[in-house]
Image (cartoon, helix red, strand yellow):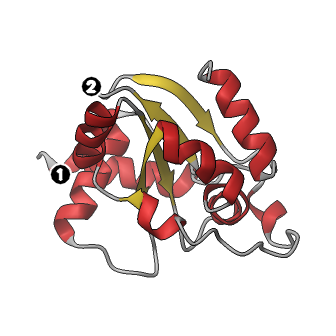
């Protein structure tokens, strides 16, 4: 019976994910090269990120994504979340976590269940959804979709939203 809400959540996310502009990103401009720091700065465990954030006086930036099937998610990742302007800010102010819902690559069953539980907890209804959390998991900032911004504009808006 505990799996029923998770099954319903998965069905809901599958139906609403990526929103109406999903195909707008298929012909996006050439993808910029990622900053080499991206792989080391991004993690996939929220609890570890919250502990690190508490230790380092940072917030936690969480990217709920469909990394291999959601065009706006891929655009946000490629054009913002792996770029120098964003990572310069993140390195000093944020612990970065990706919560992924891929369709074409397998996830460990425990990770998949944990990701679904987090999506339910934070009421994720579409991808991408970005949350900035305090060290206790409280939502400080929420953003849904990809506004087709570059890394500089996205980071400037995030700084303003976080009063940084």
Question: Which element type, helix, strand or loop, lies under badge 1?
Answer: helix
**Front-lying residue, 162 or 148:** 162
The quadrant in which the C terminus is found is top right
Q: Is residue 125 visible?
A: no
Q: What is the quadrant of residue 56 in the picture? A: top left
x then y, percent, for residue 64: 47, 50
Q: Is residue 60 left or right of residue 126?
A: left
Of the residues under marks 2 and 1, which one precedes in the sequence? 1
Q: Is residue 37 left or right of residue 46?
A: right
Mark 2 or mark 1, which is nearer to you? 2
Q: What is the quadrant of residue 51 in the picture? A: top left
Q: Which residue is mark 1?
A: 3
Identified at 48% across, 33% down, the residue is: 132
For marks 2 and 1, give the CA distance: 26 Å
* Mark 1 nearby-residue class (10 Å; few <14, some 14–19, many ≥20): few
Q: Which residue is mark 2?
A: 136
Identified at 73% across, 31% down, the residue is: 157
Identified at 22% across, 57% down, the residue is: 113
Task: Give the residue furthest to the left.
Answer: 1
* Mark 2 nearby-residue class (10 Å; few <14, some 14–19, many ≥20): few
x then y, percent, for residue 134: 37, 26
Q: Measured along the vertical axis of the image, is residue 138 above or below residue 66? A: above
Identified at 44% across, 59% down, the residue is: 41
x then y, percent, for residue 7: 29, 54
x then y, percent, for residue 50: 28, 38
Question: Which element type, helix, strand or loop, lies under badge 2?
Answer: loop
Q: Is residue 28 left or right of residue 60?
A: right
Q: Is residue 128 visible?
A: yes
């Amino acid at each position: 019976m505990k799996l029923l809400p998770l099954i319903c959540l998965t069905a809901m996310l599958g139906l609403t994910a990526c929103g109406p502009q999903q195909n707008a990103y298929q012909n996006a401009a050439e993808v910029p090269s990622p900053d080499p720091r991206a792989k080391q700065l991004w993690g996939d465990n929220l609890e570890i990120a919250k502990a690190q954030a508490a230790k380092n006086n940072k917030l936690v930036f969480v990217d709920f994504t469909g990394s291999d099937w959601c065009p706006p998610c891929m655009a946000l990742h490629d054009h913002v979340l792996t770029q120098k302007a964003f990572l310069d800010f993140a390195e000093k102010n944020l612990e970065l976590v990706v919560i992924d819902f891929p369709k074409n690559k397998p996830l460990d069953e425990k990770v998949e269940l944990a990701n679904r539980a987090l999506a339910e907890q934070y009421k994720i209804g579409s991808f991408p959804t970005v949350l900035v959390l305090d060290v206790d998991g409280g939502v400080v900032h929420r953003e849904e979709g990809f506004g087709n911004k570059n890394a500089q504009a996205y980071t400037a808006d995030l700084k303003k939203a976080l009063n940084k």
